Image (tube, helix red, strand yellow):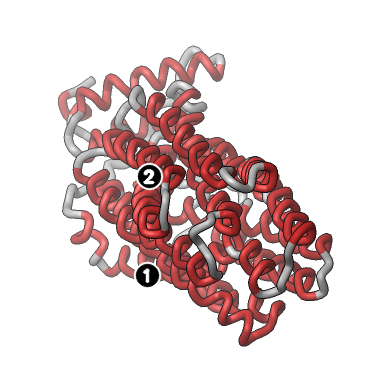
Amino acid sequence: MGEELKTNPDWYLARLDRTPTWGLRYAIIWAMGFSFFITLYDVINVGFALPYIPFIVSASQSSIIASLGLWGYVVGAPLFSYFADRVGRRPTLVFTALLTAIGSFGDALSVNYPMLAAFRFLTGMAIGADLVLVMTYMSEMSPSSKRGRYTNLAFIGGWAGIGIGPFIAALIVTSIPSIGWRLVFAVGGILAVLALAIRAFAPETVRFLTAKGKFTEADRLVSSMEVTSMKRANLKSLPEPVIKNYFIKNQNPFTILAKPKYLKRLLALFFLMFFVYFMDYPFLVIPETWAKYVLGYSGSLLSQIVFLFGVAGIGAFLGSILLRPFIDKYDRRKMTIISVIIYALGTAIMGFGGAIRSPYTFFAGAFIAELIGVGWYQLYYQMCVDNFPTSARATGYSIADGVGHSGGAIGLLVIIPLIYALGNIGGWLIPWIPAIIMTLIVLLVTPNTVGKRLEELTSSPL
């Protein structure tokens, strides 16, 4: 290798992007999948736990507790993601797994409302950062032609948190009402410890290493990934790397994001995530509270609704698998439009089922919303990863998605008043309109990212 290539970042990135398969241990994908599992499990389990926590006595208290976790996302995602852009993906991932464990066990051991509120915020800080960092890590370490499919493996593992997690949580809280809510939170802590154990052995990403000029480490890592991927693909050689010498300037993340090219992407993706989360989190967290306090469900009918909503969560897991054949073939922006529209229709059907006291209509709507609305959420995450350069990727993603969670935090506080004002169907349908509008704006201001190198999307060739 010539001296010029040794210090050319694109030499290492082009070699990575030509590999035919994932070049690291599959255990790393499992660890990243655990992270998503914990995140979505946590989102769901708080909804199942809230009606059974003895020191929560009203719908407003439930909404505040759920909202505090999301405000933690808003603080933790940009804070820790900025750290990841400056110091590294790997050390930040290790730290956030530790913080998730501390927060989850704190939730489980809470003895009063203020204690639970504090630990929900702490848990949210860690999980909000994890949502960003897992997708960033997977995308930066995957070959460009299969970026969507490899991140989808971690996504599927995580979305089992919505598919299996609700069933587990619903079974626990309905079987052991007195302490079941504590056990539900404790499971999240145990999973975080497992993720931490595996993450400790994960390498730093090639893109971060080259951005920081650590070319010796990058070469050693890429060489190992090339050998592993050739063995998995049963190849004796790889095609020549296509080096395009992209201009990659290592700047402060906020300096990069202030540039017009990235600022318009950032604003479009932020408002998309804000308005989607505005209805997404009420759907994931509030139906049990809505059924109890607004619809007046109680006893066996309430237990039936709680259980059916848990079973409907399997739809999200199935949806994440359904997405896999399409994620690297079709324009993700256009698929997002379809997803949001179906999500809105599903929640409206759920609202109708609740209003007419038909548990199975309620279930059908919830299942549709889970299958395509929640199950296809990787589309949003992938667009957030793809649209920002390496030196600002985690920070840009964290503002769009992490700060975008403020929409969910606000939605959790206002969804019950909106339902009272707009009715059980209108309250679950009309607030989706801004999200649908934003999908069209994103289509106009961001590029089609399918099959393209990350540097092609965020840099210009020299």
In this view of the protein, which residue sits in the foreground, 102 or 37? 102
Tell me the quadrant of the picture where the N terminus can be found. Answer: top left
Looking at numbered disc 1 in the image, what kind of residue is underneath it? Answer: Leu
Q: Residue at x 31, y 67 (%)?
A: 263
Residue 116, image x, y percentages: 41, 54
Crowd class of label 2 (few under 14; some 14 to 19; many from 20; radius 10 Å): many
- Checking the image for residue 267, the label placed there is 1
- Mark sitting on residue 103: 2
N-terminal label among 2 and 1: 2
Crowdedness of circle 1 by 10 Å Cα count: few (<14), some, many (20+)? Answer: some
Identify which residue, 63 or 233, lies in the foreground.
63
Q: Secondary structure at mark 1?
A: helix
Q: Nearer the viewer, residue 393 or 316?
A: 316
Give the spatial CA distance, label 2 vs label 1.
31 Å
Q: Single out the residue that lies furthest toward the bottom.
A: 421
- Give the amino acid type for the residue marked by disc 2 in the picture: Gly
User: Observer-nearest residue: 332 or 363?
Assistant: 363
Q: Is residue 184 above or below residue 195?
A: below
Q: Residue at x 48, y 73 (%)?
A: 413
Secondary structure type for disc 2: helix
Q: Is residue 322 visible?
A: no
Residue 113 position within the rendered picture, expressed as x and y whole percent measured from the top left: 41, 59
User: Is residue 205 depicted above or below 337 in this figure?
Assistant: above
Q: Horizontal and vertical percent for residue 13?
A: 33, 35
